[in-house]
Image (cartoon, rainbow, N blue to C red):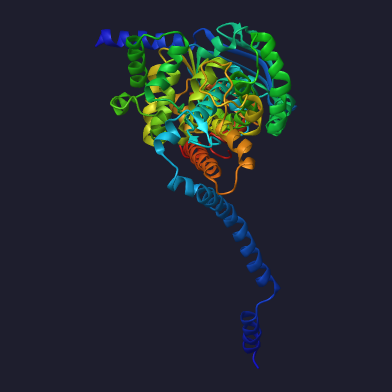
Amino acid sequence: MVDMSINLAAADMMMASLAQGPVKLGVTDLNISYGGIPALRDVNLTVKEHEIFSIIGPANAGKTSFLKALNRMDTFNTNMKVAGEILFNGLNVRNLKNIYALRSRIGVVFPLPVGLPLTIYENVALSPRLRGINKTSDLDVIVERCLTRAALWDEVKDRLDSLGSLLSGGQQQRLTIARALSQEPDLLMLDEFSIAVDPVTTMRIENVLKELKQDMTIILVTNLVQQARRLADRTAFFLEGECVEVGKTEDLFTGAVKDQRTRDYVEGKFG
Amino acid sequence: MSEIDSLRASMTTDFDSRNMDWYIDKIVQFLVFIAGISAIVFIIGIFAFITLEGFGFLLEDFSFREFFLSPFWEPSDEDAPEYGILALVAGTASVTGLAMIVAIPFSLGAAIFIGEFATGKLRESLKVLVELLAAIPSVVWGFIGLSIMNPLIIDLFDVPVGLNVLNAGIILGLMAAPIMTSIAEDALKAVPDRYREAAEALGATRWQVIYKTVLPAAKNGLLGAVLLGMGRGFGETMAVLMATGHAVNIPDSLFDPVRALTATIAAELGETAVGAPHYQALFTIGIFLFIITFLINLTADLIVRGIRKG
């Protein structure tokens, strides 16, 4: 009994040091605008390694724009202007020579599942193939591992050759998570992943995320306040293009807030 | 009279009389119906006319073996006229085949550039330009084949005549490319942007996105574009008449002159007596062309529809 409690204490300490681990992502004075209209103003925050960092806030808060700036998806939209510094593993993503290499290290899960027009197998094998892994035996291992981790393997193992788009919404979302995992990312970003997913599947995915935390850093954008509470180590509250507050999730939900608006949102008074 | 009685009286008048709006509605319905049905009526009428004109030949002088397997098209031979379209089919097929080899890379490349890489004004002006190219009359293309390609081929390849498979194939390819580009670009545009974003988020480069995601997703539409281009090449008359050399011949090389099915009809129909076997044989070629183009277009249409559903 004594030994065990000591071990538990040690584990607690380890977890604590992990939570305050090295900085994975440092954002300084981030400003994003679309055609001159600001979407996000003067955001300063850090995300630490191996934490689940959630961003909550109502629509038009700038949450998705924030994610797009992180993996340079701004190149899709010539209207989108990004200013400020984003350090990913200490390197500024604003002036990289090869943004494809950056994107390949950041997994993204979109609000609505995007099953690429490929088979289930090829959806997951695409990213490894892009990295140059072409041996069938290697790909088989990766595909099984990623689908298993995304809690989808048992449901699809007998029909890997059917189209990914034929799966149900919840299955497709787990397929996109498996696809993101096949990138072996150090950062996984999920943008309101549960919007088209039933509650049971949502809980399964949430459990998956808790496990994944040991291997990667997770940024979770959600408009479900309780989801942030269940999962996140720290939470940022975005409102109308402003980062109102960043803090330990537990503090935010127990009333230890610096800003009244955060309290109102968390308590469901608006949003 | 109570209020409800007077109301009923006025409604009865309204319900029993037909006013101007009612008649205009009926007339417009009728006109739209006529316009809609006329396209179908015309097509059936044309097919019936061609079949009727060629019918006598089909019944009397037609021999399946001779028509499809004989390389001799000698309808004006007084003693023993021969009606074999094998050489003409070979001519049309060789020219159309070469045209596709020319047109597919050009049109797919152009469609990928316009649809995936070009943005803003460049994209819009390129699209307008492609539409303009598609509107060039075929006789102008034939003229280019005759007056520009002909001496060019003679100079470049040191051959006596420049009117041949190569000339007509290139001309036809350039003719078919704009329409194929236009349809192929539509097919690429039908691929949702979220596929591109999802693939790019995986770290795929622009080309990898196109090659691994966009092209597979658009493959039915692209195939439809190629088939419609083929239909265009198959049915084209004036340009091939002018650029092929118009000699009945199964070609051995790119530099052999050939004759196309369509060009044969165009060149000979005016010189035949209405109702004569030669006249009817030309109409039988028409039936054959009609069926082939119909099949090609139908296949293309079914394939293109396939993607819209799936």
Q: Which residue is drawn at 51% across and 27% down?
A: B93
Residue lying furthest bottom: B1
| x then y, percent, for residue B267 | 63, 36
- Residue A55 shows in this picture: no
Q: Can residue B251 be seen in this view?
A: yes
Query: From this viewpoint, which residue is outermost toward the left?
Result: A1
Q: In which quarter of the image is residue B236?
A: top right
Location of residue A129 by image quarter: top left
Specify whether A79 is left or right of B272. right
Q: Where is residue B293 in the image (x, y as percent from the top left)?
A: 52, 38
Place of residue B79 in the rendered image (x, y in percent of width and height, measured from the top left): 50, 36
- Locate residue A145, reporting x and y percent: 34, 16
Q: Is residue B16 left or right of residue B47?
A: right
Foreground of the two, B187 or A214: B187
- Taking the spot 51% from the left edge, 24% from the top edge, the residue there is B215
Say left or right for A57 vs A16: right
- Pick the residue in front: B299 or A125: B299
Q: In which quarter of the image is the C terminus of chain A?
A: top right
Which is more toward the observer, B215 or A188?
A: B215
**Position of B20 relative to B90 (above/below):** below
Q: Considering the image in quadrants, where does the N terminus of chain A appear?
A: top left
